[in-house]
Structure formats: C-alpha cells, structure tokens
Image: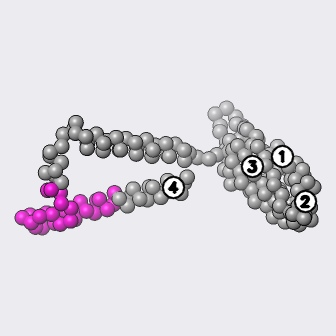
Amino acid sequence: MRVFVRLLSTVLALAVAAGGALLALEVGWRWWQPGRGPLLVPWPLWRTELSTLDWTSTAVRITAGIAVVAGIVVMLLAFGAGDRKVRLTEPAEGVSVSTSPRALARMVGLAVRAQDNVRGASVTASARRVRVRATSRMENEEQLRPRLLETVAAVLDDLPLARRPKVTVVVDSPKDRR
C-alpha cells in the first residue's frame, strides 16, 4: 500500500509541476507577445467552450460526480494506508508504546534461527499474526514444529504485547518429501 501511495503522490506532484510550468510559459508568452495567440494551451478556445456551460448542465454534473468519487477513493486509500504498529502494553497512564512489525519479526527470527537443526527461517509479522517458515535438513516438520512453536511463544511472552498475535509455523524439510 505504501508503494501505491508514494506512486500516487509522485504522479500528482508531477502533474501539478507540469501545470505550473505550462502556466508560467503561457503567462511569459502572453507578456512577451501580447498580440499573438497562445503558446501551447488553447485557452481562448476553452474559455469560449466553457462559457456555454452552466452549473446545471450534464457535463458539469458528471465531472463533479467523478471528482467526488475520486476523492472518496483517495481518502479510503489514505485511511487504509495507516501506520502498521504492534501495540505494547502501556507502562504508565497516558504513555503509549509500540513497535514495528519488522522489529517483531527480527526478534522472532533471531530466536528461531538460533534453534538446533534450523537451516534458515523467514518471518513475517503484524499486530494480528506471526508467520514463520523454517527450513531444516535434519528434522521433519513433526519433530521441529512443536519446538519452534514453543520458541516463538517464549519470545512473545517476553514482550509486553497488548494483544497476542496468532502464530503459524511451517517447516520445509527434505525428509517430509520422501
């Protein structure tokens, strides 16, 4: 979502910059050559066309509807792109503490990778869910998964989380493929 918001803000900024540059060019051209027509933008033609429209015409209402819908979509996207924090319990009244999902994933990942017979692990975390995908060559999923669940539970118990996330552990092992 952040990529979309960054891309959208970049495109809007470029559009505003291009509009400002066109306006500056047109004003400069008009001052330099007052008797000639417009440089790039046919604004006199647009002015005559727009002077025939009134506020109750269909084109104006459709344009207003499109603008309202686009504004609502952008607002919903902005609200959905809120800060993804993992809330921790408040140490005192009026003090709020949080951590990032990345920090939580790092803590869990370090503990999982420190376990015996774990070759590697990837961890994704959010306030609601922690997903661990571990690889092992020595043990299969039945042997390693309970130990990793205990490890992740111990890490989560050590943290003062306001809400305990759901834990999912998957073990990839060549022994399971046989």
The total number of labels drawn is: 4
Mark 2 and mark 4 lie on one chain; the one further toward the N terminus is: 4
Q: Nearer the viewer, mark 1 or mark 2?
A: 2
The residue lying at 79 percent from left, 49 percent from top is: 168
Q: Quadrant of residue 58?
A: top left
Tags 2 and 4 in contact by the CB under 8 Å rule? no
Mark 1 and mark 3 lie on one chain; the one further toward the N terminus is: 3
Q: Residue furthest front?
A: 178
Q: Amino acid at mark 2?
A: Asn
Q: Nearer the viewer, mark 2 or mark 4?
A: 2
Identify the residue under disc 2.
Answer: 140
Identify the residue under disc 3.
Answer: 130
The residue lying at 90 percent from left, 64 percent from top is: 178
Identify the residue under disc 4.
Answer: 4
Q: Amino acid at mark 1?
A: Ala
Q: Amino acid at mark 4?
A: Phe
Q: How far apart in space, not on screen, are marks 4 and 1 (Cα)? A: 34 Å
